[in-house]
Image (cartoon, grey):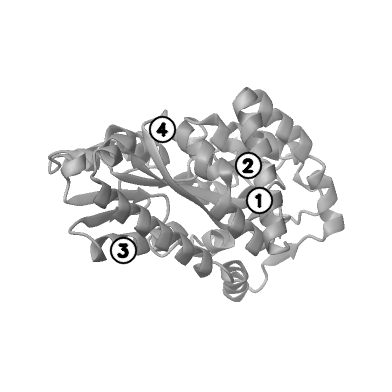
């Protein structure tokens, strides 16, 4: 399916649902789109949110998994326009609107220790106080951010050092900082919409991509790749947002219903993914016994880690004082989370 066709389908679907809307704030049915399937992390979060809202109010929540209303850019446009009440989208895509959100692609910024990682997302001043103001400028109410799992690379050949990525065409999201990150790793970053990735790997247009283990397993990326390499460089982050006009137009009771549902879904999804990475990689190995799964040692990771300062500098250059302020606050928040958990 071409990009124009997907966009057209998304527009038609969006038009169909908006016909029944009599005003976002008064809608009895709240519409919620996300970037993954129902049985993937964003889908699990969305179902728990829906369950909580419907159990504690007269509202219903209609879920739109990936592809129902188009690609990531389509659902963001629909959320900003008020066609959707809620959208779950990675800062990787939101970075086009909010450059500071690209901070989540600075390699080796987020910890691998899960307790410290989870505490950071719970208590971060940057996430809970600074980012909401930036999202509000784009007509969005930031409800929460949460991690989805350690990101690993898939390639056709083993990767033990940045030299092994030389001339490898590596799919990245359309995110300038992620491009910089993989360029620093030695690869040739190639932005592609997610819907084109499987076919591009199959035909050799690209030779690599990155995603959390659960996504590699559920989307069967292992069918068109031979090696999975985990270098500990990042944890995929996503964010739940509401259309701000819709949210601000709600009464205090409905706003509280939403916040309570977010809190429950947030804790639920953290617990859900505790062993998810290991389980997903094991399922991949079972489905494809000859798949190489390499977890690089601390020593092997050092050349990759040495690229982080350059990517960090590129982030500050892209975002100026506001980006630097958020980055510094995140580092403070991460230190506090590590201290609180012993991570």
Q: Are marks 2 and 3 in contact (CB under 8 Å)?
A: no
Q: Secondary structure at mark 2?
A: helix
The percent position of residue 73, horizontal first and vertical second, equals 40, 37
**Whether label 2 touches label 1, CB < 8 Å:** yes
- Is the C terminus in the top left, top right, bottom left or bottom right quadrant? bottom right
Residue 293 versus residue 185 in the image, above or below: below
- Residue contact between numbered discs 3 and 4, judged by CB atoms under 8 Å: no
Judging by the rendered image, the residue that carries numbered circle 2 is 105
Q: Is 324 on the left or on the right of 268, as rendered?
A: right
| Residues at marks 4 and 2 touching, judged by CB atoms closer than 8 Å | no
Q: Residue at x 35, y 54 (%)?
A: 65
Identify the residue under disc 4: 136
Farthest residue, direction right: 299
Residue at x-position 30% and y-position 37%: 78
Q: CA distance from mark 3 to mark 4?
A: 25 Å
Q: Which mark is residue 52?
A: 3
Percent position of residue 186, x then y:
76, 39
Label 1 crowding class (10 Å Cα cut-off): few <14, some 14-19, many 20+?
Answer: many
């Amino acid at each position: 399916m071409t990009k124009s066709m997907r966009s057209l389908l998304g527009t038609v679907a969006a038009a169909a649902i908006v016909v029944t809307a009599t005003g976002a704030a008064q809608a009895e049915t709240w519409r919620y789109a996300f970037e993954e399937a129902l049985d993937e992390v964003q889908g699990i979060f969305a179902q728990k949110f829906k369950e909580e809202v419907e159990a504690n109010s007269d509202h219903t929540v209609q879920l739109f998994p990936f592809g129902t209303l188009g690609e990531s850019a389509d659902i963001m446009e629909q959320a900003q326009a008020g066609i959707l009440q809620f959208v779950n989208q990675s800062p990787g895509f939101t970075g086009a609107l909010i450059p500071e959100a690209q901070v989540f692609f600075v390699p080796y910024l987020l910890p691998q220790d899960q307790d410290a990682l989870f505490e950071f997302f719970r208590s971060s001043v940057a996430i809970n106080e600074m980012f909401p103001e930036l999202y509000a400028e784009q007509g969005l109410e930031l409800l929460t951010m949460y991690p989805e799992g350690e990101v690993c690379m898939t390639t056709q050949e083993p990767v033990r050092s940045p030299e092994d990525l030389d001339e490898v065409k590596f799919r990245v999201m359309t995110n300038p900082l992620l491009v910089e990150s993989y360029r620093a790793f030695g690869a040739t970053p190639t932005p592609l919409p997610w819907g084109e990735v499987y076919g591009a790997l199959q035909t050799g247009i690209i030779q690599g991509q990155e995603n959390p283990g659960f996504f590699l397993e559920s989307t069967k990326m292992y069918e068109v790749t031979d090696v999975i390499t985990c270098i500990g460089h990042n944890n995929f982050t996503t964010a739940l947002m509401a259309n701000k006009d819709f949210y601000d137009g709600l009464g205090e009771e409905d706003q509280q219903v939403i916040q309570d549902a977010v809190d429950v879904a947030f804790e639920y999804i953290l617990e859900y993914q505790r062993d998810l990475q290991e389980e997903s990689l094991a399922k991949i190995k079972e489905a494809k016994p000859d798949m190489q799964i390499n977890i690089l040692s601390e020593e092997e990771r050092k050349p990759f880690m040495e690229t982080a300062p350059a990517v960090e500098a590129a982030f500050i250059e892209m975002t100026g004082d506001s980006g630097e302020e958020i980055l510094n606050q995140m580092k403070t928040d991460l230190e506090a989370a590590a201290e609180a958990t012993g991570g």
